[in-house]
Image: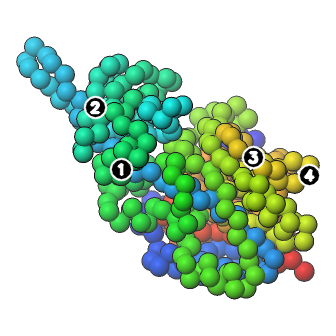
Amino acid sequence: MKLSDFDFDLPEDLIATRPARPRSAARLLVATPDKMTDAQVHDLGQFLSPGDRLVLNDTRVLPARLFGTRTRDSAQGQVSARIEVTLIDPMPGGAEWRALVKPLRKLADGEIVTFEGGLAATMVRREEGEAILRFNMTGAAFDAALDAAGQMPLPPYIAAKRPADAQDRDDYQTVWARRPGAVAAPTASLHFDSALLGDLAAMGVATTHVTLHVGAGTFLPVKTDNPDEHKMHAEWGEVSEDAAAQINATKAAGGRIIPVGTTALRLIESAAGAGGVAPWVGETDIFIRPGFEFRVADALMTNFHLPKSTLMMLVSALMGHDRIKQIYAHAIAQQYRFFSYGDASLLIPGSEKPV
């Protein structure tokens, strides 16, 4: 297995920079081992059965991208530099955050970056190319200041094409987002709206919420030619006692467990054991690639992923390397839109519906 095994050519114009409207109007490619069906997300119920259970990630994306100013004295007087900060995750205590800073070389330890609305951060130290920043606010005051000063942290391939705007505050958040902490959205979930959720509930498809705070590391490229040498980023998650019980009951009754998004899938597989899913809380760096044995997930709803990414390896593990190449070739030929604001796929490694 080599990194190049997960590469493919993607036309630039298939990278979506805005989502479909309404959300459930996005296209949906339903794929089994021997069949592909072109549909739309609002058709999802046609491919599910009463007793199936969707697992939904209820993390809430923070407006984690900040633009501020660093000022220092020089022989020519005060000089300023524009500093861009993307928060990654909080350190114990809540006042300090790991962050990506651009340009990091223009910020010395001890210097202060000021943002809108009185928010400010002191550069504490560097760790492996990241900054540790101490903010002048914590708790509710910090949350309010961040909400006022921050922008949605759009993925690099969207941010390179256009800046985030007010519309992204709604577009880049799921309708069931509840627990703040993510710096990237669980993007397959962005296709759901209240009407679709109501239709699925009416036909007997159940839902369970879990939490995985998606980190900026989800966009980090794989840099090793041998994927086994890649170190995954860790993300905090929780499967509650109720969520574990619901998933186990569905499995016992013969229903299918279908995570919506790779984040929900990675979390429930982290919590899986020989006796089913157990209540679980902590950080996971699970790396799902070909050869992985799935214990919980029976199918997966997910968007179309970056070439040579860990998520391409995950869907290859689920469907098989050759089959996922066929699925992606079909998606490109049929002009599906790719990545975070793009279209969706429903990947079913077994039969399309339980008999």
Please say if the residues under marks 2 and 1 sit with CB atoms less than 8 Å apart.
Answer: no
Label 1 Cα crowd, 10 Å radius (few <14 / some 14-19 / many 20+): some
Q: Which residue is mark 2?
A: 113
| Mark 1 in CB contact with mark 3 (< 8 angstroms) | no
Instruction: Give the residue type at disc 1.
Output: Ala
Observer-nearest of 296 and 115: 115
Amino acid beneath label 2: Val
The one of 125 and 351 positioned closer to us in this rendering: 125
What residue sits right under mark 1 in the picture? 144
Of the two numbered discs 3 and 4 on the same chain, state the one appearing first in sequence.
4
Q: Is residue 339 visible?
A: no
- Residue in view at x 14 percent, y 16 percent: 74
Which residue bears the numbered disc 3?
Answer: 280
Mark found first going from the N terminus, 4 or 1 = 1
Sequence order check, earlier mark of 2 and 3: 2
Distance from disc 2 to disc 4, alpha carbons, whole Å, reads 50 Å
Q: Amino acid at mark 3?
A: Trp
Looking at the rendering, in which quadrant would you find the N terminus?
top right
> Residue 18: x percent and y percent?
41, 67
Q: Would you identify the image quadrant in which residue 131 lies?
A: top left
For discs 1 and 3, the disc positioned in front in the rendered view: 1
Q: Left or right of 311: which side holds 341?
A: left
**Nearest to viewer (mark 4 / mark 1):** 1
Residue 87 at what x, y percent from top left? 43, 40
Would you name the residue on which mark 4 appears? Answer: 275
Mark 3 residue element? strand
Question: How packed is label 2: few (under 14 Cα within 10 Å), some, or many (20 or more)?
Answer: many
**Total marks placed:** 4
Q: Earlier in the sequence, mark 2 or mark 4?
A: 2
Residue extending farthest to the front is: 140
